[in-house]
Amino acid sequence: MSKFLLEVVTPERIVFAEQADMVVVKGVSGELGILAQHIPLVTPLKVAPVKIKRGNQTDLIAVNGGFIEVRKDKVVILAESAELPGDIDVERARNAKDRAEKRLASKDNVDFKRAELALQRALSRIDVAGGGK
């Protein structure tokens, strides 16, 4: 299987830069599976885990929004933030999930869009860290 260079970059650092067989992301129009030699593409991303397939191994990265740029031999994910599983504090993510769910259930003056994004970020982080079991 052909490989391509995948880079996951945030304003602070390069989170991931390795050869990959496939990357699966959740774009605003749906899920995208990218293989080597994919047609060039730029699209915004939703808050969701990114799946990286390398041989028999599948890695996950929690990506919080941004864009994916697909070139013939390179894919770059420009993320607002991104975390590898080992960098995620699962307890903190669970607490953030609980807070967001309480805000969404509240009838008070709540910024529902902000609370929903917080919930999505927390769920993504829990999923990537394997804490959703």
Image (cartoon, rainbow, N blue to C red):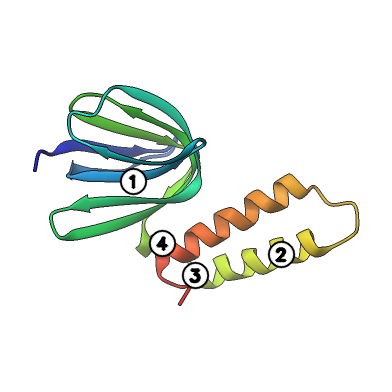
**Label pair 1/3, CB-CB below 8 angstroms:** no
In the figure, is residue 30 to the left or right of 1?
right
User: Who comes first in sequence, dot 2 or dot 1?
Assistant: 1
User: Who comes first in sequence, dot 1 or dot 3?
Assistant: 1
Disc 4 marks which amino acid? Answer: Val
Disc 1 marks which amino acid? Answer: Val
**Label pair 3/2, CB-CB below 8 angstroms:** no
Identify the residue at horizontal 34%, vertical 56% (top origin). Answer: 60
Q: How far apart are labels 4 and 1 at the CA level?
A: 14 Å
Q: Quadrant of the C terminus?
A: bottom left
Q: How far apart are labels 2 and 1 at the CA level?
A: 27 Å
Q: Considering the numbered disc 1 on the image, is that residue within a helix, a strand or a loop?
A: strand
Residue, disc 4: 128
In front of the other: label 2 or label 1? 1
60 lies above or below 5? below
Residue, disc 3: 90
In front of the other: label 3 or label 2? 2
Residue, disc 1: 24
- Work out whether residue 6 can be spotted: yes
Q: Which mark is residue 71?
A: none
Q: Residues within 10 Å of mark 3 (few under 14, many from 20)?
A: many
Disc 2 marks which amino acid? Answer: Glu
Identify the residue at horizontal 43%, vertical 47% (top origin). Answer: 82
In the figure, is residue 54 to the left or right of 14?
left
Q: Which mark is residue 101?
A: 2
Q: Residues within 10 Å of mark 2 (few under 14, many from 20)?
A: some
Query: Farthest residue toward the front?
Result: 30
User: Who comes first in sequence, dot 2 or dot 4?
Assistant: 2
Q: Picture quarter containing residue 128? A: bottom left
